[in-house]
Image (cartoon, helix red, strand yellow):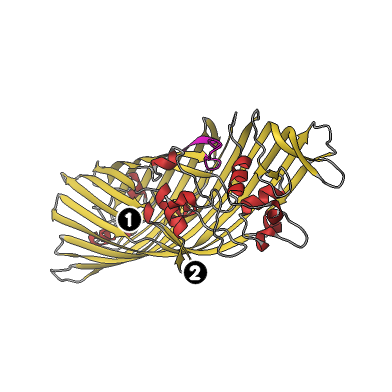
Amino acid sequence: MKCKYLLLGFALALFTQNSYAQSAFDLYSASQTDLKGTARFMSMAGAFGALGGDISTLAQNPGGIGIYRSSDINFSFDWNFQTTKTNGEKLKNDAAFSFNNFGYVGSLKIGNDVMPNFNWGCSYNRLANFNRRYMGAVDNIQNSMTNYVAGQTNDYGWKASELGESTSYNPYLDSNAPWMSILAYNSYLINPLSVDDNFVGLYQNGTTGFAEFEVEEKGHLDEYTISFGGNIYDILYWGASVGIQDLEFNQYTYYGESLNNAFVPYETSQDGNLAVGNGYSSWGIENSFRMYGTGANFKLGVILKPINELRLGFAFHTPTFFSLKSEAYASTSFMFETDELDVVNNIRGGAETDQGYIAETWFDAQSPWKVMIGAAGVIGGRGLLSFNYERNMYPTMKVEYDGREDRGTTDCVKAYYKASDIFRIGGEFKLTPQFAVRAGYSYQTSPSTEEIKSDELNVVTAGTTLSYTTDDNIQYVTAGLGYRFRHFYADFAYLHKIRNTTFHAFSPDDFGIAPTAEVKDSNNEIVLSFGFRF
């Protein structure tokens, strides 16, 4: 695949001198969605593609707006309680409260046998909550990030004279060298054995040590939807939606290593002459990344009711076409100690990218195409059983700079991601005309290819963030209650979400496998919705 021949671990093509190119992982972050909506929708695991008649269908299958025979206003709140386990170590995140959903549907009775109603509506829906924090340690590491960076820097022929900072030369602006190579060299994480010779990392034969990492993600993906639709002979219900999405994604990462019997630099004279010898090293890198902007999409859907007891649904979503900006900054801290006889000073200190300035990039991105089908049955007038299938075509994600597609990132997207399938089943039973009980289950297959999950690929990230994650399956178990009294209704939902992820500190290479850790998210969510039909 073309992706593996790009500059490994960091961006080769910088579109402006002080910017980071975007990676396939950034596109995936911008394209993630959760099970979000009204409490009724969520309590049935979102299996509403063939049901309609709920505010949330405006963002799922807009054909559901055609089911309405009266106007509807609804708003929802949720509380999220998240626990994360990293290699079995549990970390509780703070409970989060959010205003999750709001919507209005207006219904106009036309009085026409062909199309009895024409409906319109608008809604706000939080599609994704990115808040997550996890940390951990990996003992007895078999490779060092510094060796990986040294190897990539050597492969592409960069020399110390091109990477070093001075009062008159800023390699971040005055060269096309990768930012990770520059930062690593100026942090003494990679060192040439002689002037302009190949670089070596800190890890050598006989080195032992451990790695530590921390990842904190924050942000949201919100959508504002305008919809319209109607029905034909009360058999075919149709609808269309225009969605405007607002994205905010923030990520902080820390990675550090403590190594014994390492290949460390030290000063051999007061003039700062350097040598490399055996010793102890402790170093870490912090990355801050922010991506934000807006995008637009279009959705079209229909629901067919051939008989009163059966409904069939179909919808497709265009990609969201985003206009985004990213900001990035990185810094290191380091300490080296050696017992070599000619040591004058041990080295310690810190460095930062581009003298502390933030790297900024403007770009356009395209999220995946989506299609969904559904079927629902009415059981005895008191029960509903609904099934949904959704396909997210992640290989269709793209990024563009000034109207030109970044083909390298496109190749990486296709190498790292495959289409992901979501299966949803939900049911509702009315105990009385006023009270209903609900339950549901959702299963989403992994979007990561087997090659990247099994460390068979050289993996390209962007800038100085070399870590990445691969997602496994995602599951939801849901339940809820509903109450109706005249025009007023209230719904309650409980969701339990399980997501399995593998953290990779950096790409595998010829020297060995990078440190990895298994991360398991366990989310419990409570949702309340209130509405009024008139």
Q: Is residue 301 magenta?
A: no
* Left or right of 294 in this view: 424: left
Q: Is residue 354 left or right of residue 105?
A: right
**Which quadrant holds residue 171?**
bottom right
What residue sits 70% from the left and 37% below the top? 282
Whether residue 328 is situated above or below residue 193 in the rendered picture: below
Nearer the observer, 263 or 284: 263
- In the visual, does 269 lie left or right of 192? right
Between 493 and 239, which is closer to the camera in this rendering? 239
Q: Identify the mark nearer the N-term, 1 or 2.
A: 1
Q: Which residues are magenta?
A: 504-522
- Residues packed near mark 2 inside 10 Å, few (<14), some (14 to 19) or many (20 plus): few
Kind of element beneath mark 2: loop
Residue occupying the point 84% across, 35% down: 342
Q: Position of residue 2 (x, y in %)?
A: 44, 52
The amino acid on which the numbered mark 1 sits, given as a three-letter code, is Lys
Q: Position of residue 180 (x, y in %)?
A: 62, 51
Is residue 214 visible from the viewing direction of this image? yes
Under circle 1, the secondary element is strand
Where, quadrant-wise, is the C terminus in this rendering?
Answer: bottom left
The answer to whether any part of residue 436 appears in the image is no
* Residue 402, numbered circle: 2
Residue receiving disc 1: 370
Residue 293 sits above or below residue 341 on the image: below
Picture quadrant where residue 361 is located: bottom right
**In front here: 278 or 405?**
278
Task: Tell me the mark number nearer the camera, choosing from 1 and 2.
Answer: 2
